[in-house]
Amino acid sequence: MLNLKSIFSVAVIAGALAITPAQAQEIIKLATTTSTENSGLLKNLLPKFEAESGYKVQVIATGTGKALKLARQGDVDVVMTHAPAAEAKFVEEGYGVTPRGIMENDFVILGPKNDPAKIRSSKTAEEAFAKIASSGEGFVSRGDNSGTNMKELIVWKGAKVEPTFSGYRSVGQGMGKTLLMANELQSYTLSDRGTYVAYKAKLDLAIDYDGGAALANPYQIILINPEMYPGLNHKGAKALSDWLISDEAQTMINSYTVEGEQLFKATYSK
Amino acid sequence: MSEGWLALLQQALSLLFSLDPDVWSIVNVSFSVSFAALAITLVPSLVLGFILAFAHFPGRWFVTNLVQTIQSIPTVVIGLLVYLLLTRMGPLGDLRWLFTQKGMILGQMMICAPVLVAMSQAAFTSVDKRAWETSRTLGASWLRSVWVICRELKVPLLMAIVAAFSRILTEVGCSMMVGGNIADVTRNIPTAIALETSKGDFAQAIALGLVLLILSLILNFTLGTLRGKAEPRSH
């Protein structure tokens, strides 16, 4: 009995040792924002990369703030976010290397279909925001340090409005949930176009303002400094980054549509 | 790690003791919503528990089991139900209660009522039926007799109240769905902890966790003392 038992446990341990290193090599942990996951883009791109490279990508979809934090702490192998200022800081402080702009989409200001704050005639996003604040209408903010939330705060700053007016609701939720809340409350909100298109059928909201440089939304993929965290899967991370800027992936990004609308524009230039 | 454990704990404590307005607004929302839900449900639930224990009527068995079942439904399912009731398209949509404290109170009432009913029913069942009969034959009014029994059952009834209160004070699913976690309006302790954790900012989450921890310590020690006193002295 004892013999059988010890043989069995040795076999199990040996098996575990044989499997673990091989598997760890194959997994790439990618921290990214909810927008790339919610929009379905990653589900479209990653299987192709996985089939070609043999790696398996595990996606941790969260706000940009937390994604960069996970990367700082060496909890993930690579990060893909959309907050230029926070990303620049991440690279400057030595955590990130080889930042590559791979694509962009844009933000839109959504609101009730009858546009009670009359923002459709605005010339800039800042002007639209100022009108919402002074109109007494509601505004739902994600309030979760996500890239969208950071963008929103920049626009408020540009509009010289403190986002503390009575209709302002900071809800601390992901984009999809925030859209549903804005819909329920018939308030204005700032959304990335991708999530909006994905949720459009469920919403009684319209794009009341879009366009302009202030609402552009560029995405970067950034590798993690191997000197800081040597134990990470840097090889896999680099393979993913290289693949995302390949002609094949860039074409796939451009041709990805939801409900007939193109969500992302590939932007990598050699 | 860029932040050590000690540094985080220190930050959390200083948030608490500097009476950080954000933290205390969250604590305030938690307590006012949960107290309101408990206060509204308390008397009707105890009455129902009493009736289920003392009265015999057709369907009693069914109601008892129904209450037990509702007690074990996850709070997110109750949240879903209340959400569907209160959404713009829902039957109560015109109230505009979704993402308000009123909506949260409604959800928490549905969570704490079954706990109160089931636990008070158990308490009332345990009491000697003769106490009731004696009280009645001695000429005490119906209400007066109930009061006598409630005093007799002070400890188990308090335990029911504490259990119900801690269940609603700590539940996150229903509050998140129905309240929407709006800062200064419907953001309570559990939803704030969920949010801060999702942002990767742990100091405030720890501060709020400490508030809950201290509160449950106080509640449980008080109960323990009460229970100790209520124990029969002669063995």
Image (spheres, rainbow, N blue to C red):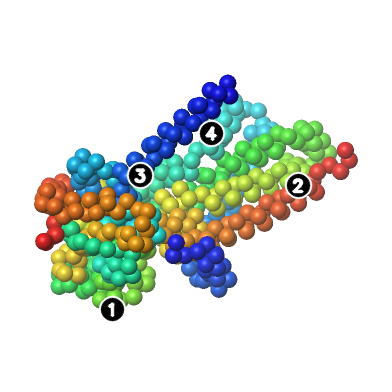
**Mark linked to residue B69:** 4
Left or right: A38 as drawn, with respect to A71: left
User: Residues at badges 4 and 2 in contact (C-beta under 8 Å)?
Assistant: no
Left or right: A54 as drawn, with respect to A29: left
Q: Chain of mark 1?
A: A
Look at the image and tell me in which quarter the C terminus of chain A lies: bottom left
User: Residues at badges 1 and 2 in contact (C-beta under 8 Å)?
Assistant: no
User: Residues at badges 2 and 3 in contact (C-beta under 8 Å)?
Assistant: no
Circles 1 and 3 on the same chain:
yes
Q: Earlier in the sequence, mark 1 or mark 3?
A: 3
Q: Look at discs 2 and 3 and give the one toward the viewer.
A: 3
What residue is shown with label 1?
A160
Q: Residue at x 55, y 53 (%)?
A: B169
Question: Dot 3: what SS?
Answer: helix
User: Residues at badges 3 and 4 in contact (C-beta under 8 Å)?
Assistant: no
Question: Dot 4: what SS?
Answer: helix
User: Residues at badges 4 and 1 in contact (C-beta under 8 Å)?
Assistant: no
Q: Amino acid at mark 3?
A: Ala
What residue is shown with label 2?
B227
Distance Cα–Cα, label 2 vs label 3: 54 Å
User: Which class describes the residues within 10 Å of circle 2: few (<14), some (14-19), or many (20+)?
Assistant: some
User: Which class describes the residues within 10 Å of circle 1: few (<14), some (14-19), or many (20+)?
Assistant: few
Q: Nearer the viewer, residue A89 or B187?
A: A89
Q: Position of residue B122 (x, y in %)?
A: 67, 36
Q: Nearer the viewer, residue B205 or A25?
A: A25
Q: Position of residue A28 (x, y in %)?
A: 30, 48
Q: Residue at x 35, y 49 (%)?
A: B87
Q: Look at discs 4 and 1 and give the one toward the viewer.
A: 1
Q: Is residue B136 above or below residue B86?
A: above
**Mark linked to residue A24:** 3
Q: Amino acid at mark 4?
A: Thr
